[in-house]
Image (spheres, rainbow, N blue to C red):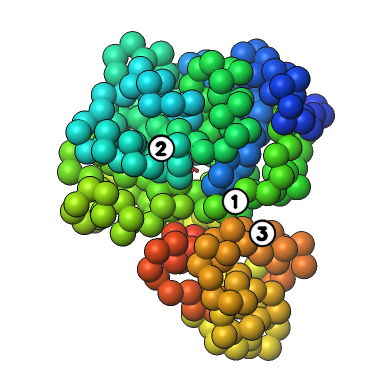
Amino acid sequence: MQSRNDNATSETVVLSTDAAGLASAAEVLRAGGLIAFPTETVYGLGADARQSDAVAGIFAAKGRPSFNPLIVHVADLAAAEALVTFTPQAYRLAQAFWPGALTLVLPLRAGSGVSSLVTAGLATLAVRVPDHPVAQGLLRAFGGPVAAPSANPSGRISPTTPAHVLTGLNGRIAGIVDGGACGVGVESTIVDVTGDPVLLRAGGIPAEVLAEALGAPLAHPSAEGTIAAPGMMASHYAPQGAVRLNATAALPGEVLLGFGAVAGDLTLSRSGDLREAAANLFDCLHRLDAMAATAIAVAPVPNHGLGAAINDRLRRAAAPRD
Ligand code: AMP
Ligand code: MG
């Protein structure tokens, strides 16, 4: 299929975050084009969630398998309610954490208008209200649901700066809104709230914090649960070099990514701060690519709070590749 989105030779326009820039970005989305934009987690690659051609463009630009569903971004709870049916626990989480780094999977409403490419044909939809002034400004200027996975080639490192986005997608997308670096640095936490809450992906809001708001721990997906996380590829977020985890020193030829007391050649956080480490994670992996590191050793990172999301991404970065 030929559309403006899979024309790999067109120029990617860099747009400002002022009203004129956001109006231009919204216009591109209306015309079925692709716009990368900042959120508090990572840069998203947005398309009008109601236009199948536009959504197909996301899969084409990223080289993403079409069975991997997308998260839809909306400006507020009311806009989310137009797309999905809320459960009591979903309301509780939305009220506590939206806008924010939390994605809720809920039953898709009949007549939502969302393209079935977004859900990969599932009866559920993943929705999020981002907490970033530029994302909010774009969603309001556009006035509709925006399907947006991370703005990187499928399986590669997520982008937390405009430069990261352009490294992977320059010439493959219509434009990018330049809002500087993302604050949280890891993707949203995904919770399936169609029934008892199930943690599908660790992310920017720690599971412990969600459990506290719910008054009960989150369940984890069952091993045989195929509905749980259709797109959770073992290998993902991968830098060019091979990755070895839980290293306290570099072996010959390795570049060491440090944390806390393990100093490293570069560090996620010298002081051992998990928030700082999350914000630095993907930039460090991009820098290792820029250094052409062929072997990467990574210091241990504690597994509580944001450490769960960091370790999830590191495990996928270290997983065997196809
Ligand atoms: P990404 O857009 O790359 O941050 O990934 C979004 C992830 O959300 C996918 O890989 C899926 O695992 C998950 N997801 C999206 N929609 C659904 C859904 N309807 N049900 C379960 N998981 C979903
Ligand atoms: Mg992604």
Label 2 vs label 3: CA separation?
26 Å
In percent of width and height, residue 264 lies at 65, 81
Q: Residue at x 65, y 13 (%)?
A: 31
Amino acid type, mark 3:
Asp
**What residue is disc 3 on?**
283
In this rendering, is residue 318 above or below 88? below
Say which of 292 and 259 sits in front.
259
Q: Secondary structure at mark 3?
A: helix
Q: Residue at x 76, y 62 (%)?
A: 290
Q: Between label 2 and label 3, give the one nearer the viewer.
A: 2
Q: Earlier in the sequence, mark 2 or mark 3?
A: 2
Residue 98 in the figure: left or right of residue 176? left
Amino acid type, mark 1:
Gly
In percent of width and height, residue 24 lies at 73, 19
Q: Which mark is residue 183?
A: 1
Q: Residue at x 63, y 33 (%)?
A: 134
- Is residue 156 visible from the viewing direction of this image? no
Residue 200 in the figure: left or right of residue 134? left
Q: Which mark is residue 98?
A: 2
Q: Secondary structure at mark 2?
A: loop
